[in-house]
Image (cartoon, rainbow, N blue to C red):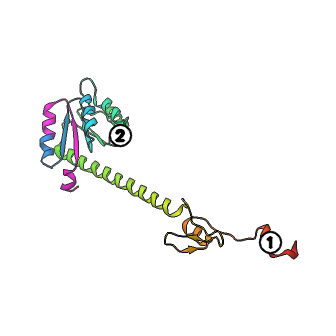
Amino acid sequence: MNKEKIKQTTILIVDDKIVNLDILLTYLEDFGFRLMVAQSGNEMLERLERVIPDMILLDVCMPDMDGFEACRRVKEVNEYKKIPVIFITALSDTINKVKGFELGAVDYVTKPFQQEEVLARIKTHLTIERLRKQLQTKNLELKKALDQVKVLSGILPICSACKKIRDDKGSWNHMESYIREHSEAEFTHGICPDCAIKLYPDLF
């Protein structure tokens, strides 16, 4: 993840302990991240109403609303649920780790943590999220392009005499050629009863 993308990245750090906030703020500021802080789950939700960050670093053990409940509330809101959440907590048992992942967190770091490890995990999940967004955009663009190329829609100018269709360039095309080019339709040829009587009257 290059320096320019880091400068465009906003991280919300949520922890009720000032010392923990100071450690992360001091370390991550040196790498150019834009940082926000909150000291409770409620304060975090208030921050989200004003700015939607690219990632949330969330402590679990906080008064009033713990990190698990805060994460659950984030994931309930459409505008917030795609934000990657990394728990940073002293709770190291498997039950709490599993609970964190079940609530939608992308990672779980136990305290005391190594600053370099936190940075590596942040960069990894920011990269994953960026690639996910790029893939989603490409899929939408591809779907839109396919819909436009292969679906006939709108008003088609057609000659009332010869039944040719005028394309966007002003050229007149046989209806069969135009439909084949602008849709997924396949043609099989035959003769309808009315034409059969007209062309072969001796047989009827």
Residue 64 appearing in the image: yes
From the top left corner, tell me how far across and down residue 129 is, in percent: 32, 49
Instruction: Determine the secondary structure under disc 2.
Output: loop
Residue 113 appearing in the image: no
Residue at left offset 12%, top offset 37%: 22
148 sits left or right of 56 in the view: right
From the top left corner, tell me how far across and down residue 115 is, in percent: 16, 44
Q: State which quadrant residue 98 falls in.
A: top left
Q: Amino acid at mark 2?
A: Lys
Quarter of the image for the N terminus: give it. Answer: bottom left
Near-viewer residue (117 or 56): 56
Pointer 2 local density, CA inside 10 Å: few below 14, some 14–19, many at least 20: some
In the rendered picture of this protein, how many numbered marks are placed on residues? 2
Residue at left offset 20%, top offset 30%: 39
Q: Is 16 inside the magenta-drawn segment?
A: yes
> Which residue is the site of mark 2?
81
From the top left corner, tell me how far across and down residue 74 is, in percent: 33, 35
Q: Which portion, as a residue range, is magenta?
A: 1-24
Numbered mark located on residue 166 in the image: none
Near-viewer residue (195 or 163): 163
From the top left corner, tell me how far across and down residue 123 is, in percent: 24, 50
> Which residue is the site of mark 1?
196
Marks 1 and 2, how far apart at CA? 64 Å
Q: State which quadrant residue 73 falls in.
A: top left
Earlier residue among tags 1 and 2: 2
145 lies above or below 56: below
Instruction: Determine the secondary structure under disc 1.
Output: helix
